[in-house]
Amino acid sequence: MLYGKENREEAAYLDPIFGSNSEGCDLPKYKLNQKSVEPRIAYQLVQDELLDEGNARLNLATFCQTYMEPEAEKLMSQTLAKNAIDKSEYPRTAELENRCVNMIGDLWHAQADEKFIGTSTIGSSEACMLGGMAMKFAWRKRAEKLGVDIHARKPNLVISSGYQVCWEKFCVYWDVELREVPLDSKHLSLNLDHVMDYVDEYTIGIVGILGITYTGRYDNIAELNEIVEEHNRNTPHKVYIHVDAASGGLYAPFVEPELIWDFQLNNVVSINASGHKYGLVYPGVGWVLWRDQKFLPEELVFKVSYLGGELPTMAINFSHSAAQLIGQYYNFVRYGFEGYQEIHQKTHKVAQYLADAIAACDRFELINDGSHLPIVCYKLKDPDAQEWTLYDLADRLLMKGWQVPAYPLPKNLDQQVIQRLVIRADLGMNMACDYVQDMQAAIHDLDRAHLVYHEKKTIKTYGFTH
Ligand SMILES: *Cc1c(COP(=O)(O)O)cnc(C)c1O
């Protein structure tokens, strides 16, 4: 979010660059300049502005894809102008989206006797918004039929406190109470002993998370499904599960195909994933699927014209570029099942190597060892044994270009500061070895440092953690 700038005088480009005449004028930074400038100058100015940003490949903070093949980039830049919503003008693009939904439905074991339905989105946030809305509308219908006074209380959504911020947004935007099942040191994922204590007649659904953003842990969806099954057997007030598989949805099916978490479980009614996380596409694409059309209330489906006819759509956004969608389809065609599997297994191996190296350091205790999602996170074994904190370590690593966030765990565990590495396909073993060396050197330096910047007692979020 951006705020107005007060000192507008200072806020101008003052010096000409690279000695061109047309560079000899001042350009304001916070209002439009009066005249236009040459493309070359605009290009140079903007590029220079971006020079000191982090190097995406060294960013171990983000789940988002930071590398695509040149062919994918070429296709995507050639298709930037296509508008994904304009199905009538771009029917082939619409068909590619349709194929992607089918491929993902297959990957998530959509059942033959049901009619799955799904759509692309801008990312998991939009996908979760749609999944949440469908749950809310479907609950309202069920509750009204059962004679529940739906206006007496706010509906609620049950999720572990390790939720990603999009669920908080969903609850604020659509006036739903967010019921958090707290994480505790024994339960670093959804606490199944207590989850049903939070469920009542006003519960629109339970969200299971396949890859908690903070730690990389998976909620046990199969066991949750059993608990919900038992609950639904004994009450007319049924509740269903949405799986937020933003990161795991396009990872687990390849690396742990035996893990049962998807539409094989009959109470899992909808699932979302980010194409731009382990779907290996640059930021801007996500997916949401319902196991059967009956779980997607028809009020939420709108019609757009398509080749003289109509096509159902469901999205919060309208116009946006189809390039990411096409990038996703390219990846599916290019890699196939085995390609994704190989890439993700390699990423898994790098995560194991890093987890082992970090454990071997003796300073840290692993909280997630990358055995499911390739996320390694750890805390200091004995914070009092040295002068420095994980924030200082993050600083030293940043000197080498590595972006590694340090932050407290969610509510209840927020006295615990951890550091997290998200391993992506473009972090090869060579780079991982370099990282370990840099980390060892950083620890060596910090042990001998006399000046530390971060108060030992301060708990804060440092770096990008979403
Ligand atoms: C990343 C993430 C999101 C948000 O996904 P975007 O694609 O960035 O909108 C939602 N839920 C979880 C669990 C995530 O990890």
Image (cartoon, helix red, strand yellow):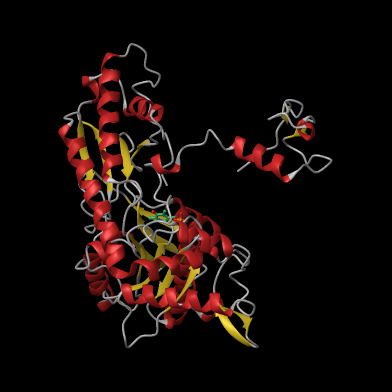
Q: Quadrant of the N terminus?
A: top right
Q: Ligand 1 shows up in which quadrant of the image?
A: bottom left
Whether residue 20 can be seen here: yes
Q: Which of 111 and 96 is in front in this view?
A: 96
Residue 398, compared with residue 47, is above or below; it is above
Task: Name the residue located 38 percent from the left edge and 52 percent from the top edge.
Answer: 163
In x, y percent, where is residue 138?
Answer: 46, 76
Residue sitting farthest toward the top: 450
Whether residue 121 can be seen here: no
How many marks the image carries: the answer is 0
Residue sitting farthest toward the right: 34
Q: Nearer the viewer, residue 70 or 83?
A: 70
Kindly indicate the quadrant of the structure image that contains residue 236: bottom left
Residue 322, compared with residue 168, is above or below; it is below
In x, y percent, where is residue 460?
Answer: 41, 32
Kindly indicate the quadrant of the structure image that contains residue 40: top right
In x, y percent, where is residue 143?
Answer: 44, 76
For residue 428, side relative to residue 26 (left or right): left
For residue 83, side relative to residue 12 (left or right): left
Residue 172, compared with residue 130, is above or below; it is above
Task: Name the residue located 28 percent from the left edge and 57 percent from the top edge.
Answer: 344
In x, y percent, where is residue 140?
Answer: 48, 74
Task: Name the residue located 39 percent from the left edge and 59 percent from the top edge.
Answer: 246
